[in-house]
Amino acid sequence: MGWDAKDIALLKRLWSAGQSAAQIARHLGCSRNAVCGMLNRLGLKRGHKPPTARPQIRPAPKLTPSSAACARPVARKVASNTAESQPPKEFNRQQLYAILAEAVRNTG
């Protein structure tokens, strides 16, 4: 689009009246990007708008034991080196079948 003095004067007048770039583009018959580019080249800017909302900053909620990930009491912690210090226990076939049967009953 070719910008002549009449279009630029109309652009400045509509911009100062508070119309948006899209509204001005429809009025002039060009694209919004063309209007934004010309506004930029002319150095026309809107004044800083004050924020419409006033958000309140709330402190983070304090965690209580009831909101923890695990509310149940934890059994005593087993040290990792106890398994290394004792040799692994050998089971015979009958003991292994008994352990397996108990595991099947517990998965119920």
Image: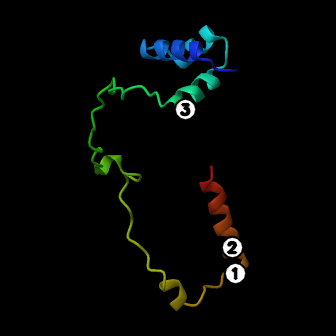
Q: On the picture, is 34 further left or further right than 79?
A: right
- Can you identify the residue that label 3 sits on? 41
Place of residue 37 in the rendered image (x, y in percent of width and height, measured from the top left): 59, 29
Place of residue 33 in the rendered image (x, y in percent of width and height, measured from the top left): 63, 26
Quadrant that contains the N terminus: top right
CB atoms of marks 1 and 2 within 8 Å: yes
- Can you identify the residue that label 2 sits on? 96
Sort mark 2 into few (<14), some (14-19) or many (20+) by Cα contacts within 10 Å: few
Cα separation between marks 1 and 3:
89 Å
Q: Nearer the viewer, residue 33 or 51?
A: 33
Place of residue 43 in the rendered image (x, y in percent of width and height, measured from the top left): 48, 31
Sequence-wise, the earlier of marks 3 and 2 is 3
The extreme front residue here reads 5
Instruction: Indicate which disc residue 48 carries.
Output: none
Q: The residue under label 2 is which amino acid type?
A: Leu
Q: The residue under label 3 is which amino acid type?
A: Arg
Instruction: Indicate which disc residue 92 carries.
Output: 1
Q: The residue under label 1 is which amino acid type?
A: Asn
Residue 38 lies, with reference to residue 84, above or below; the image says above
The quarter of the displayed image where residue 48 is located = top left
Q: Which secondary structure, mark 1?
A: loop
